[in-house]
Each structure stands twice: as C-alpha cells, then as structure tokens.
Image: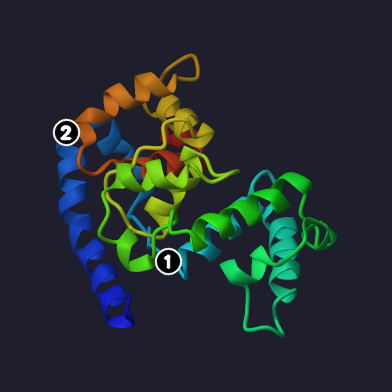
C-alpha cells in the first residue's frame, strides 16, 4: 500500500472517531462516564510494515516484557542485516538453532519458520489484501499460523489495520476494565462482555480502548 493510501486510511480513522464516540455515549451511560473521565481517544493505528514482520514481532513479544522482547527482536533482525533485511524467504533458510542463539525459545523459533512458510505459500495475505479483507476472514487465515492466536490477530486489527469493530473479550485488561466500569464484584467472562458489546457495534474497538485506559484512572474517578 502506498504512503498516500496509508495516510488516507489514517484520515478516515480520525474522521470516524467523533461519530464513534457520540454513538458509544448515546448507547451506554456507564461507558459514557468512562469516556468523559479518560478524555480524548489517542488511538492511532501504526503502519503495518509488512504482515510478515508485524506477525514476527508479535510472536517474539509474547509473554515477555517490552524491553526484553525488543532486544530479542533486534537480535533476530540483525541476523539478516547483511542480506537485505528480515524477510519470509530469509527466515526459511535459517536453522532453528540460529534463531535460538538470537534469544528465541524453541517454540518461537519454530513459530517464526512456520510464519515464513505460510507467508511464502500465500496463506498470510499481502498488505494490500489485508486492507480489503473482513475482520473474521483475517482471523481465520492467520490463526492457522503456529504461535498466532485470536488475541494476536485482534491486536493487529486494532493497532495496525485500524479496524473499528474489534472486541478482544479474552484480554485480561478488557475484562478488568469492564468489571470496573459496571461495578462487578467478580472478573466478567468473555461471553458476558461479548453479549454486552452488541450495543457498542460498530465501534467496539473504541470501547475496548476506553476499557483499557480506565484502568489508569484514580480511585476517586469511580
């Protein structure tokens, strides 16, 4: 996708924000209070780089602190610094032992190679294809990759593709934020959140963002 097309996508996302917030506040009084207390939405989808690199980064970052994951990802990228950069084809030629030597666990090294294989074979869509595909089709395609679950794809949809109607109901932060917003004594189930989120459609991404951010509010806000 060209830079112009990417900029156009960002402009579309920003233009939709005001409409989305009005819809959410009208549909849900409790969420409206959270929106008021948190303030303006600062969610800005990042360029997707390439689907391969975005997913490779997601795999490496799983279950690690940001600093540790960034260090390992940098080491893996450095393996290909003299050969035109990290690509699916270059990773396919890399033995698992080399990836492990860069800091990847065996499971993550195997997952990276599986990602590379599925990228080369066409299972992983190209960037231009992703922007034309519906959310569920993207999820169905990408969860076939070893080490990539639905949550990982949902993060891609929200933070890279700028999709407006994503609800990662299994996310712990979402569950905790939902419980705070609605004064629940116990952590809500993903099913309960999904059922309630029907009233937020087609702007569940924005509702998700506010549920995450409400965890940063002081106790006095509640």
Residue 181, by quadrant, is top left
Q: Nearer the viewer, residue 183 or 111?
A: 111
Residue 28 seen:
no
Could you tell me which quadrant the C terminus lies in? top left
- Density class for disc 2 (Cα within 10 Å; few <14, some 14-19, many ≥20) is some
Could you tell me which quadrant the N terminus lies in? bottom left
Q: Which residue is mark 1?
A: 46
Q: Which residue is mark 2?
A: 27
Residue at the (41%, 60%) spot, across then down: 160
Residue at the (20%, 42%) spot, across then down: 202
Q: Going by the image, does 135 lie left or right of 199?
A: right
Residue 75, by quadrant, is bottom right
Q: CA distance from mark 2 to mark 1?
A: 28 Å
- Residue closest to the far top: 185
Residue at the (48%, 14%) spot, across then down: 185
Give the percent coordinates (x, y) of residue 154: 42, 45
Residue 217, placed above or below residue 187: below
Give the percent coordinates (x, y) of residue 161: 35, 59
Q: Which disc, if any, is residue 58?
A: none
Residue at the (77%, 47%) spot, across then down: 106
Q: Total label count?
A: 2
Give the percent coordinates (x, y) of residue 4: 27, 81
SS assignment at label 2:
helix
Give the percent coordinates (x, y) of residue 101: 85, 61
């Amino acid at each position: 996708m060209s830079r112009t097309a990417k900029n156009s996508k960002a402009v579309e996302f920003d233009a939709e924000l005001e409409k989305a917030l009005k819809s959410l506040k009208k549909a849900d009084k409790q969420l409206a209070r959270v929106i008021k207390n948190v303030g303006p939405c600062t969610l800005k989808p990042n360029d997707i780089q390439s689907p391969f690199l975005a997913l490779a980064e997601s795999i490496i970052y799983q279950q690690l602190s940001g600093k540790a994951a960034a260090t390992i990802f940098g080491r893996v990228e450095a393996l290909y610094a003299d050969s035109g950069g990290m690509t699916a084809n270059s990773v396919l030629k890399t033995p698992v032992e080399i990836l492990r030597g860069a800091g990847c666990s065996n499971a993550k090294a195997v997952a990276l190679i599986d990602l590379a294989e599925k990228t080369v074979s066409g299972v992983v869509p190209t960037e231009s294809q992703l922007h034309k595909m519906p959310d569920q089709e993207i999820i169905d395609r990408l969860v076939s990759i070893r080490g990539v679950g639905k949550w990982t794809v949902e993060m891609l949809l929200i933070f890279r593709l700028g999709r407006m109607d994503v609800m990662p109901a299994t996310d712990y932060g979402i569950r905790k934020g939902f419980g705070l917003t609605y004064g629940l004594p116990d952590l809500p189930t993903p099913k309960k959140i999904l059922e309630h989120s029907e009233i937020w459609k087609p702007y569940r991404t924005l509702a998700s963002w506010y549920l995450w951010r409400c965890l940063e509010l002081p106790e006095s806000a509640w």
